């Protein structure tokens, strides 16, 4: 297994240490900074390096507006790792539909709800993500990650035909080798539609890149 999904980290924290966390998508820098300023550590899934198709998990624990950077502590890269705001968003975080996992004790849940507002409710969060991704693909029809994010948003909303179309557009634009290591919604979409043979073909693409 080349990947630990973020939801598996969430479940591990709860089952092993009784630490709460909640998985969100469609994050933005302002939300990250607001969470950090209020004492939340935030687990993110991203590319290990800009535009490199190796998935990674890091912990964002600070920011510096003067320098325009997020500050991370990272089990692989060390402490006080610096990420430039816009570069990190566009070249490392966006590919995972800007997924984020605030970690907190139970008494801080009301504060978390106040920060994320309507995004606390998953259907609303995915709909907002869908709208954002629709804007992104209109701005740049050749943005394969925007199309992929559109697909994951449609999938979460159980709009499987629309998800398949978005994933196919993304794939035709040229998925990186390891795309299906970390996000398997294209395969899950085909299973939901009963297109099992096509799902198996996508599985082979994932296995081909499994080295």
Image (cartoon, rainbow, N blue to C red):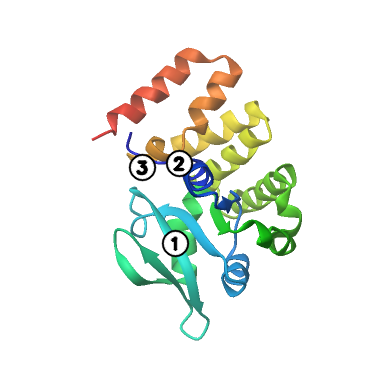
Quarter of the image with the C terminus in it: top left
Q: Return the residue found at the far front.
A: 17
Residue 63 horizontal/vertical position (percent): 50, 76
Residue displayed at 55% across by 54% down: 101
Q: What crowding class fits label 3: few (fewer than 14 Cα within 10 Å), some (14-19), or many (20 or more)?
A: some
Pointers 3 and 2 in contact (C-beta within 8 Å)? no
Q: Nearer the viewer, residue 198 or 152?
A: 152
Residue 52 horizontal/vertical position (percent): 33, 53
Q: Label 3, on which residue?
A: 176
| SS at mark 3 in the image | loop
Q: Nearer the viewer, residue 77 or 188?
A: 77
Q: What crowding class fits label 1: few (fewer than 14 Cα within 10 Å), some (14-19), or many (20 or more)?
A: many
| SS at mark 2 in the image | loop
Residue 135 horizontal/vertical position (percent): 65, 53
Q: Which mark is residue 196?
A: none
| SS at mark 1 in the image | strand
Q: Earlier in the sequence, mark 3 or mark 2?
A: 2
Q: Label 1, on which residue?
A: 59
């Amino acid at each position: 297994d080349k990947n630990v999904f973020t939801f598996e980290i969430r479940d591990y924290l709860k089952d092993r240490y009784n630490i709460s966390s909640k998985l969100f998508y469609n994050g933005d820098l302002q939300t990250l900074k607001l969470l950090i300023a209020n004492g939340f550590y935030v687990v993110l899934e991203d590319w290990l390096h800009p535009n490199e198709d190796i998935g990674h998990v890091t912990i964002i624990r600070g920011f510096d507006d003067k320098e325009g950077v997020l500050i991370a502590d990272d089990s692989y890269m060390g402490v006080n790792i610096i990420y430039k705001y816009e570069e990190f968003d566009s070249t490392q975080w966006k590919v995972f539909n800007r997924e984020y996992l605030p970690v907190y004790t139970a008494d801080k849940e009301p504060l978390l709800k106040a920060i994320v507002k309507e995004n606390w409710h998953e259907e609303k969060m995915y709909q907002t993500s869908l709208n954002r991704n629709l804007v992104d693909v209109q701005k740049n029809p050749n943005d394969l990650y925007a199309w992929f994010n559109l697909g994951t948003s449609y999938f979460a909303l159980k709009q499987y035909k629309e998800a398949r179309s978005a994933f196919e557009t993304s794939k035709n634009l040229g998925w990186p080798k390891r795309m299906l290591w970390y996000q398997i919604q294209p395969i899950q979409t085909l299973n939901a539609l009963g297109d099992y043979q096509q799902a198996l073909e996508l599985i082979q693409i994932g296995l081909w890149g499994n080295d």
